[in-house]
Image: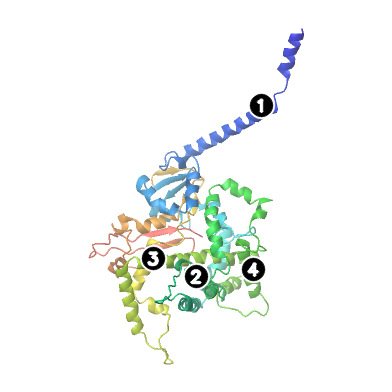
Amino acid sequence: MAFLASLSERAISRPSTSVILYYVLGFLLLVHAIRRVRGWYRLRHIPGPALAGWTSLWLTRRYLKGTFCQDVPALVDRYGPVVRVAPDKIVCTDITTMYRISGVRSDYKKSEWYTISRVSRDGDHILSLIDPELRKERKKYIMPAYTGRGVDDFEEGIDRALASWIDLIERKYISTPGKNAPMNFEEKAHFYSLDAVGEIAYSESFECVKQDKDTKGVLGINDATIPILMAVGNYVALWRILRMWPFYLLFPNDGDECGFGAIVGQAKKLVAKRLQPDAKPKRDMLQSFIAHGLRGEPLSQEVGIQFFAGSDSIASALYTTLLLLLTHPSVYTRLQTELDTANKTSPPATDGSPPPTIIHDSQARSLPYLQAVIREGLRLFPPLTAAPAFKEVPARGDDVCGFPLPGGTLVATANAILQGCREKGFWGEDGDCFRPERWLEADDSETYMQMLMQKKRDTVCSSLPSNNPGSQHNTIRDPRTLGAQLS
């Protein structure tokens, strides 16, 4: 009887805590494995690196290394125009498809990936807004400024920033036989672009060039945080948690002494200064925002994002084009000859003073080789294409280049611009080469490709020139359009 009683007590005894933990852990691992398999199964028919089908680590690693946009051409050569880069993400470089996805009436919508561009814990700007109606409402306030309506100080503001840059070079970076004065052009291009943005957007320079330093800390913030933000954007669930209380308190705030929060604080100071009762109205972008009714936190957010998005795209276009010029001496020499000739033939000012040091925009547009160099530089390194800009496939699903995509799949759109600008089947075998002459060989009756990326409506479009039958280099057959909704 004692033996049976002992067996009975053992049979009804509770399992130990460690056993329960093992069961819970095993259940969670099973759920995780099922989710992994389901995630892989949804896009199993999309070619791509094997690891990318199971985990986002493949894509995260390339973001942290900063090589993703350089890896895309190799992926396309190996797998085709549609490549799987994460369990729920693909890259598509087919231009026609991207134009359809990014069209104004497209059913695709911005994914939560865009929310990583928030510069503070409160509010959104035009890039981070993902609700279509809210974005439509916001554009009514800001698009007049971006299209130049009511803003007539663009050229004068840019000239002031350029004059300051020229002065800095003459003061500190002119080498002599006894003194070598190297200049970090990439850094100085960022300084100039920040000052230029300040001049045309707020009618005041940030004095980065004058002081020869990053007075607002924008460059340091970009270098330190953007690769991390891009990587975190791969994990939407984690990003949602970070935006909840109490984690959102870790986000930048306008009271911070450095980082994104300090930039937002500076933006609010600019806004407060302009809204003073005795403030003199300007003819700049900030005044246009105010004149069209933008107020409060949305106004500060739109001002804040200009510190980053506007200045970085200008600087990257400048230093990549100069790099191409320095590594192609024949192009450099031909451009210098055209500029010297134009300088000699420039008419004197009406008051008899010598021609200005900085060329007028109208004259610059009349110099064909200069315009060809600008277009060719922007073709090889178009701004705003390093980030993937993921759009979300509508719930009904879609067919992309013959591949069915289930609803919720994220499609990278911006990479199609970079790929299309170098596509050898479109530009010829020298599509990767810096050859400005291709723009001069194109048929003059056609419109040149306007590669200066402008946020116009919902799409950033570029029209390409048609083929000149007399050119052996240009293989363009028909005008086409590149599109990617980046805002």
131 with respect to 15 (left or right): left
Q: Which residue is mark 3?
A: 323
Q: Could you tell which of marks 1 and 4 lies nearer the N-terminus? A: 1
Q: Which residue is mark 4?
A: 268
Could you say which disc has been placed on residue 19 in the image? 1
Find out whether the residues at labels 4 and 2 contact each other: C-beta distance under 8 Å: no
Find out whether the residues at labels 3 and 2 contact each other: C-beta distance under 8 Å: no
Marks 3 and 2, how far apart at CA: 17 Å
- Seen at 56% across and 65% down, the residue is 218
Disc number lying in front (4 or 3): 3
Give how far across and how far down residue 478 sits, in percent.
31, 60
Report the residue that reaches farthest toward the top.
1
369 with respect to 180 (left or right): left
Q: Could you tell which of marks 1 and 2 lies nearer the N-terminus? A: 1
Marks 1 and 4, how far apart at CA: 57 Å
Q: Quadrant of residue 303?
A: bottom right
The image shows residue 454, relative to residue 116, as above or below, that is below
Disc number lying in front (3 or 2): 3
Q: Residues within 10 Å of mark 1 (few under 14, many from 20)?
A: few
Q: Residues within 10 Å of mark 3 (few under 14, many from 20)?
A: few
11 with respect to 371 (left or right): right
SS type, badge 1: helix
SS type, badge 4: helix
Q: Which residue is mark 2?
A: 193
Disc number lying in front (1 or 4): 1
Q: Quadrant of residue 381?
A: bottom left
